[in-house]
Image (cartoon, coloured by chain):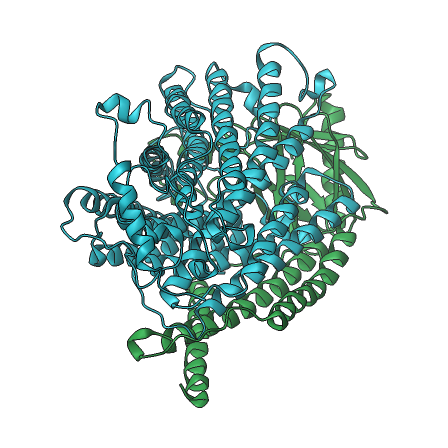
């Protein structure tokens, strides 16, 4: 399936480099007014790493307060602000922009396009974000404090918020505008700008998963915008959409929110599936197993994600028929997800594996994401969910799929493509140290939370009965260590970009497949100005 | 790689996986900390516990299977051992097998899951009814058949100890954060229906030993039921974020034998007639 790209292709690319490396001279021209997909990708990635550290700092506050029973550090209201902001920042500020950053860098290079289809809109969709998050974070310095009703923003509680609420809603609107524009751009790029011969079923999995993710985003971000707008008018203009006393319906908000919220969790994880499907074949030296079924499984998961929102609301009170429908639909998701895991394992089976840092993170992803997926299957069982719901068992579940899931895949992607982006190799030794410390401590952090939840500890509480003390302390120690480990990650990136003396080759790894590896490292500022002609032997499929 | 070697490595990895599972799922319980769902004291809680254990063990077996194959591969099929990559890239037969088998496993899981759910949702034949109303941050209980009602809040000792830097060690307080001034008194062996609602924001009434939680929502009345098997004191907490004191509105249920419960009811109603006041305390 794979073979060397012919030398003429690489020469053609180098020729392209001589004409295509005109970066804007001034700092503002280069970064503020940029329309270059690589620069915008870099901006997204820097932004998301910053937000990851800020959201992580909030998690440290949470784990510090929960280190032992009794309130030692913060008031309960500030604790609630921390859990709310931690979630909003990590979901909308860290993981989503990080995936858009990789999409910007990689999709044009992977499909042989010169840039994104809509470069000026691309600039705008990034530059909205710093303002949106500045506004969101500014609420922490207001008299009323930040939002404290949880990231799910359930009324009537959220309607008790102070003046911060208008800022929060406007920030969410801006994030939504940014995501929708980014998604339109990605869809337009993938559907219109593929190089000759790059048929849909030859596209890399990362492009496929992002194409499907972009459709999910366009479908659900307006739903969230509608929901928060109704909250806004309920709060400030005396409407009664969600106010029972005025004929409104607080449960309706939850239905609308989770109609957005469940596809949202797949928005966070589908690009991760794509990245792992790129990395495992490279380091197994074997083609991806079952490419076509991987594409269909991704599309199936995306479809099912629209009809399972009710599983977040089993205890809200719904008719037996509704509970049964949402239980069966949710259980069904484990079938295409299982297909993906089995295909990944089959990709590794009989390969010739090496274990560079990206591969380690990809393997860590498959193992720990599977654990998170299995606890998700347990949560789907409605009757048992009447015990699990809103406990630390749920906290453990979604952190397993998001931290060693999405975040590990982002780290794998960083190590895999950073040498391509920068032309420098990162420190393999420190990459491995980062992997092992992260993997050990993420489990110390989140595994005991399963026990806490099953033993009866509700989530979102600042203080707890001493019977939960031991595992909370272990979890907090894991949390502090995991948090500290991420400074290694930042240091590795800074070293790779600015200090590393080891130059990366065009291919970086041992014969990876994909158009991005036919470009030199780093690629020219304007790559694929002339589209390559894609033949069967240049793609994995 | 010879086939026997693959089998030997796979068995070794399997043993390691089982050891790891034991370390993760059994050993922490030996520290004396509770690590599993309670069996509880009602038919529902036992159903939910059994269901939980069935699904847990199915998931554990699936996990051990997948990880055994994966780590066997990681051990054997590595470049440093000189393993040459195979060329295969798909198998329709394999894809069909690992689509159908999970579907069958899901069907096996769905049968007890459906049964338990149908049982839980059947609140017919209740012998007494209690209305529960959630407030920020206390619970109100109304015995609709006995004409008793009172408000239940976090007990005074816990409330003092839970203040920021109170200087009172939580361990020194009996049932820290899980004790109330007026517990909910219930009879054992009677099917009791609960009508659950809220007055301000959404709360959730949860006593793990009863086997369920239900959201208390303003403008809605949710129903649930229980039938407690054993006398005793059962503790729980609000399970839905309801503002700054969400962590401080516990629930205590004291289940009494039928005759003691009747005596308590008589005492309450008599006391009420005497004092002609609302909100008598037990």
Marker count (numbered): 0
Q: Going 78% across and 53% down the picture, which residue do you hit?
A: B118
Which residue occupies the extreme right position in the image?
B125
Q: Which of A42 and B114 is in front in this view?
A: A42
Chain B: its colour in the image is green
- Where is residue B110 shown, x and y percent of the image? 72, 60
Q: Colour of chain A?
A: cyan
**Residue A457 spot, x, y in % from top left:** 50, 46
Residue, x 32% and y 68% (percent of image)? A354
User: Which residue is rendered at x = 65% and y = 51% of the image?
Assistant: A330
- The percent coordinates of residue A231 (x first, y second) are 59, 20
> In the depicted view, which residue is nearer to us: A45 or A151?
A45
Is residue A273 visible in the rendered image? The answer is no
Q: Position of residue A183 (x, y in %)?
A: 51, 34
Q: Which residue is drawn at 50% across and 28% down?
A: A181
Q: State which quarter of the image contains the N terminus of chain A.
A: bottom left
Image: A312 above or below B17: above
Q: In this picture, is A364 found above or below B91?
A: above
**Foreground of the two, A124 or A193:** A193
Residue B107 in sight here:
yes
Which quadrant of the figure has residue A17?
Answer: top left
Residue A80 falls in which quadrant of the image? top left
Which residue lies most toward the top here? Answer: A237
């Amino acid at each position: 399936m794979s073979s060397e790209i012919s030398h003429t292709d690489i020469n053609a690319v180098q020729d392209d480099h001589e004409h295509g490396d005109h970066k804007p001279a001034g700092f503002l021209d280069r970064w503020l007014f940029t329309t270059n997909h690589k620069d915008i990708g870099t901006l997204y990635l820097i932004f998301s790493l910053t937000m990851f550290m800020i959201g992580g700092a909030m998690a440290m506050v949470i784990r510090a307060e929960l280190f032992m029973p009794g309130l030692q550090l913060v008031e309960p209201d500030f604790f609630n602000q921390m859990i709310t902001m931690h979630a909003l920042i990590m979901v909308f500020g860290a993981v989503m922009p990080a995936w858009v950053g990789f999409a910007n860098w990689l999709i044009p290079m992977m499909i042989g396009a010169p840039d994104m289809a809509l470069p000026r809109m691309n600039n705008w969709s990034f530059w909205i974000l710093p303002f949106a998050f500045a506004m969101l974070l500014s609420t922490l310095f207001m008299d009323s404090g930040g939002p404290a009703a949880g990231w799910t923003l359930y009324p009537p509680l959220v309607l008790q918020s102070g003046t911060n609420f208008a800022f929060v809603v406007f920030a969410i609107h801006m994030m939504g505008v940014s995501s929708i524009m980014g998604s339109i751009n990605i869809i337009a790029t993938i559907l219109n700008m593929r190089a000759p011969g790059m048929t849909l079923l030859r596209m890399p999995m990362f492009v496929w998963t992002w194409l499907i993710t972009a459709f999910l985003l366009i479908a659900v971000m307006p739903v969230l915008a509608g929901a928060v707008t109704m909250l806004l008018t309920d709060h400030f203009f005396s409407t009664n959409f969600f106010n029972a006393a005025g004929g409104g319906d607080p449960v309706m908000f939850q239905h609308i929110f989770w109609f957005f919220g469940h596809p949202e969790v797949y928005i966070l994880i589908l690009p991760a599936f794509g990245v792992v499907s790129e990395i495992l074949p490279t380091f197994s030296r074997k083609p991806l197993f079952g490419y076509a079924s991987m594409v269909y499984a991704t599309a199936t998961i995306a479809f099912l994600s629209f009809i399972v929102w009710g599983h977040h609301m089993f205890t809200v009170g719904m008719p037996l028929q509704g509970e049964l429908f949402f239980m069966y639909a949710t259980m069904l998701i484990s079938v295409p997800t299982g297909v993906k895991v089995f295909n990944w394992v089959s990709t590794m089976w009989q390969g010739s594996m090496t274990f560079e840092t990206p591969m380690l993170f990809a393997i860590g992803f498959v193992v720990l994401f599977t654990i998170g997926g299995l606890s998700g299957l347990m949560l789907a069982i409605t009757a048992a969910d009447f015990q699990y719901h809103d406990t630390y068992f749920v906290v453990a579940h979604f952190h397993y799929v998001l931290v060693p899931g999405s975040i590990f895949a982002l780290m794998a992607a960083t190590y895999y493509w950073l040498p391509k982006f920068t032309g420098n190799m990162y420190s393999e030794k420190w990459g491995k140290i980062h992997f092992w410390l992260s993997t050990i401590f993420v489990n110390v952090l989140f595994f005991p939370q399963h026990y806490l939840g099953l033993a009866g500890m509700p989530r979102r509480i600042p203080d707890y009965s001493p019977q939960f003390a031991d595992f909370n302390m272990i979890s907090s120690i894991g949390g502090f260590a995991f948090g500290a480990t991420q400074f290694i990650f930042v240091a590795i990136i800074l070293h790779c970009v600015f200090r590393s003396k080891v130059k990366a080759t065009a291919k970086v790894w041992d014969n990876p497949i994909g158009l991005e590896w036919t470009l030199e490292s780093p690629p020219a500022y304007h790559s694929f100005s002339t589209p390559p002609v894609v033949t069967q032997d240049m793609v994995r499929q | 790689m010879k086939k026997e070697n693959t089998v030997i490595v796979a068995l070794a990895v399997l043993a390691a996986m089982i050891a790891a599972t034991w370390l993760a799922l059994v050993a922490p319980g030996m520290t004396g900390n509770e690590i599993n769902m309670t069996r509880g004291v009602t038919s529902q809680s036992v159903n939910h516990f059994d269901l939980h254990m069935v699904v847990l063990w199915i998931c554990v077996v699936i996990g051990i299977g997948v990880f055994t194959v994966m780590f066997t591969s990681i051990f054997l099929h590595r470049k440093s051992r000189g393993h040459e990559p195979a060329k295969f890239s798909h198998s329709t037969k394999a894809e069909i097998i690992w689509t159908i088998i999970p579907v069958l496993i899901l069907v096996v899981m769905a049968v007890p899951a459906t049964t338990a759910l149908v049982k839980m949702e059947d609140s017919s034949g209740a012998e007494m009814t209690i209305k529960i109303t959630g407030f920020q941050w206390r619970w109100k209980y109304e015995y609709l058949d006995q004409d008793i009602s009172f408000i239940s809040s976090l007990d005074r000792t816990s409330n003092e100890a839970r203040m920021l830097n109170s200087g009172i060690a939580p361990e020194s307080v009996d049932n820290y954060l899980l004790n109330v001034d007026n517990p909910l008194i219930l009879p054992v062996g009677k099917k009791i229906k609960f009508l659950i609602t809220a007055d301000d924001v959404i709360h959730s009434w949860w006593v793990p030993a009863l086997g369920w939680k239900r959201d208390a929502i303003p403008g809605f009345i949710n129903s649930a039921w229980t039938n407690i098997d054993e006398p005793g004191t059962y503790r729980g907490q609000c399970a839905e974020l309801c503002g700054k004191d969400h962590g401080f509105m516990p629930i205590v249920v004291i289940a009494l034998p039928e005759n003691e419960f009747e005596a308590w009811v008589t005492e309450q109603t008599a006391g009420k007639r005497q004092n002609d006041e609302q909100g008598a305390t037990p």
